[in-house]
Every structure is written in structure tokens, then in C-alpha cells.
């Protein structure tokens, strides 16, 4: 079993913050179907990567997710 340090738990909180931000920003998508698909896609990405333990890989995934959210949801510039 891997030993998780403080950095890992900080990254966990960043992922949660990123998810909440994406949910809030998706409210500005006018089409309800597109909104639900966007939320489902983002949630599936988090679920797919929830078993990662390498801090560098997690940081890279967070960076990529931020970039994708900024492209998909223009109201998320404060991220």
C-alpha cells in the first residue's frame, strides 16, 4: 500500500475544487442535454483517474483538465 504525503491530499482537494468549478460553469450551457453530457464526461474522467497515486501524473492530469474546461466552458476563466 503506498504511503500518501501531504502533496497527495492537497492535490485531492484541487481535483474536488476543479470538479465543483466545472459543475458551476456548466450551468451557463444553454442546452440541458449538452450540459448533462459535459458533466457526465468530466465525472467519468475523474472516475477513470481516481486510482492514480503518482503526484506528477496527477498534477499533469489537473493541468490538462483545466485547459479542457477553459476551452469547453468559456465562463471558467477564473480557474
Image (tube, rainbow, N blue to C red):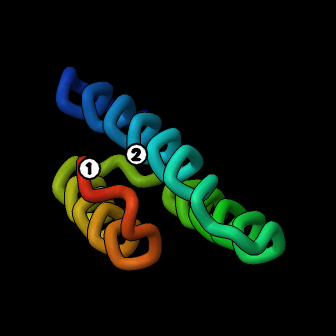
Instruction: Give the vertical position of 29 relative to 43 (above or below).
Output: below
Residue 6 in the image, given as x and y percentages of width and height: 20, 21
Q: Alpha-carbon neighbours of circle 1 within 10 Å: few (<14), some, or many (≥20)?
A: few
Instruction: Give the vertical position of 45 relative to 79 (above or below).
Output: below
Instruction: Give the residue furthest to the top.
Output: 6
Left or right of residue 34, residue 7 in this image: left
Q: Nearer the viewer, residue 40 or 56?
A: 40
Q: Which residue was labeled with disc 2?
A: 18
Instruction: Give the vertical position of 17 relative to 22 (above or below).
Output: above
Q: Residue at x 82, y 74 (%)?
A: 33
As measured in the structure, the alpha-carbon distance from the residue carrying label 1 to the one carrying label 2 is: 8 Å
Residue 4 in the image, given as x and y percentages of width and height: 30, 28
Q: Nearer the viewer, residue 13 or 34?
A: 34
Left or right of residue 56, residue 1 in this image: right
Q: Residue at x 26, y 28 (%)?
A: 10
Residue 60 in the image, given as x and y percentages of width and height: 22, 64
Residue 79: assigned label: 1
Disc 1 + disc 2, Cβ < 8 Å: yes
Residue 24: assigned label: none
Nearest-to-viewer mark from 1 and 2: 1
Q: Alpha-carbon neighbours of circle 2 within 10 Å: few (<14), some, or many (≥20)?
A: some
Residue 62 in the image, given as x and y percentages of width and height: 30, 57
Q: Residue at x 41, y 54 (%)?
A: 52
Q: Nearer the viewer, residue 67 or 60?
A: 67
Q: Nearer the viewer, residue 63 or 25?
A: 25
Q: Quadrant of the N terminus?
A: top left
Q: Element under label 1?
A: loop
Amino acid at each position: 500500500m503506498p504511503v500518501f504525503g501531504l502533496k497527495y491530499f492537497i492535490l485531492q482537494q484541487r481535483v474536488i475544487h476543479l470538479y465543483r468549478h466545472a459543475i458551476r460553469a456548466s450551468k451557463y450551457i444553454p442546452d440541458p442535454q449538452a450540459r448533462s453530457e459535459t458533466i457526465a464526461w468530466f465525472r467519468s474522467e475523474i472516475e477513470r483517474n481516481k486510482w492514480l497515486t503518482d503526484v506528477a501524473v496527477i498534477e499533469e492530469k489537473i493541468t490538462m483538465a483545466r485547459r479542457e474546461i477553459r476551452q469547453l466552458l468559456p465562463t471558467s476563466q477564473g480557474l
